[in-house]
Amino acid sequence: MPTYNGISIQMPGPPSPGQALPQLSPDLLGASGPIIQVQIQPPLILAQAFQKEGTPLPTPAQGFALIDTGASISSADNSVFTQLGVSPNGVALVGTAGGQQRQLTYPARLSFPGTNLPEFDHPKMLGCDLGGSVVLGMPNARLIALIGRDILKLFVFVYNGTAGVWSLSI
C-alpha cells in the first residue's frame, strides 16, 4: 500500500558541530498544516494532443500543496494553469469565507514527487489566487495548490496533531 508519512520538524537552532537532531513539532504542524510536495502538469489526454501537434510540453508547475479537509474541491493557483497553457473547462459556484463565488475549473495531472503515491488526472480543479501564501518553516517554498476532499476520498488520511505527524495512503 503506497503511503507517505509527513512530519513537521523544528531545528533547535542554527546548524553547528554536534548539533542536536531536529525535533518533531506539533506546534509547527498546527500552524502550517499538512504540506506535501506536488507537481501539476496538463492532463494525459492534453499532453498527448500537444505531442501529436508537435507542441512542446510545458514545464510542470512544482511547489507544495496544503491538505485542506475544509475544501470540498481541490484547487491550484491561477498562475499554474497559465504556465501550463491549460484552458478552463467549466465554472463552479463555491462557498468561501467571503461568500459564494464563481471560479473557473481546469483539468490537471497531479503527482507527488519524492513519494510512492500514484499520479492521476483530475478533471476539474478550481483556479484560485494563492499568491502570497507561504509555507511556515520553509523559506522560499511556494504553495501552489490545496488538496480537498474530492482528492482525499481516494486516500486514507491520518492527522496526529499531538505527535506532529500525518500520513496519506492509498
Image (spheres, rainbow, N blue to C red):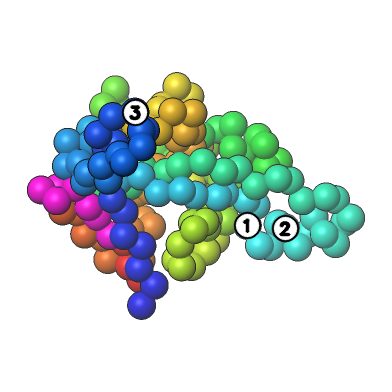
Alpha-carbon distance for marks 1 and 2?
A: 6 Å
Of labels 3 and 2, earlier in sequence is 3
Q: Residue furthest right?
A: 54
Image point (29%, 22%), residue name = 98
Identify the residue position indicated by label 3 in the image.
14
Identify the residue position indicated by label 2 in the image.
47
Q: Is residue 98 magenta?
A: no
User: Where is residue 4 shown, x and y percent of the image?
Assistant: 36, 62
Check the image and report above or below for 58 versus 50: above
> Within the image, what quadrant is residue 5 found in?
bottom left
User: Could you tell me if the residues under marks 1 and 2 are in contact, i.e. CB atoms within 8 Å?
Assistant: yes
- Amino acid found under the numbered disc labelled 3: Pro
Mark 2 residue crowding within 10 angstroms, few (<14) / some (14–19) / many (20+):
some
Q: Nearer the viewer, residue 57 or 73?
A: 57
Q: Is residue 166 magenta?
A: yes
Image point (36%, 33%), residue name = 16
Identify the residue position indicated by label 1 in the image.
43
Q: Nearer the viewer, residue 63 or 83?
A: 63
Check the image and report above or below for 142 versus 150: above
Q: Which residues are magenta?
A: 161-167
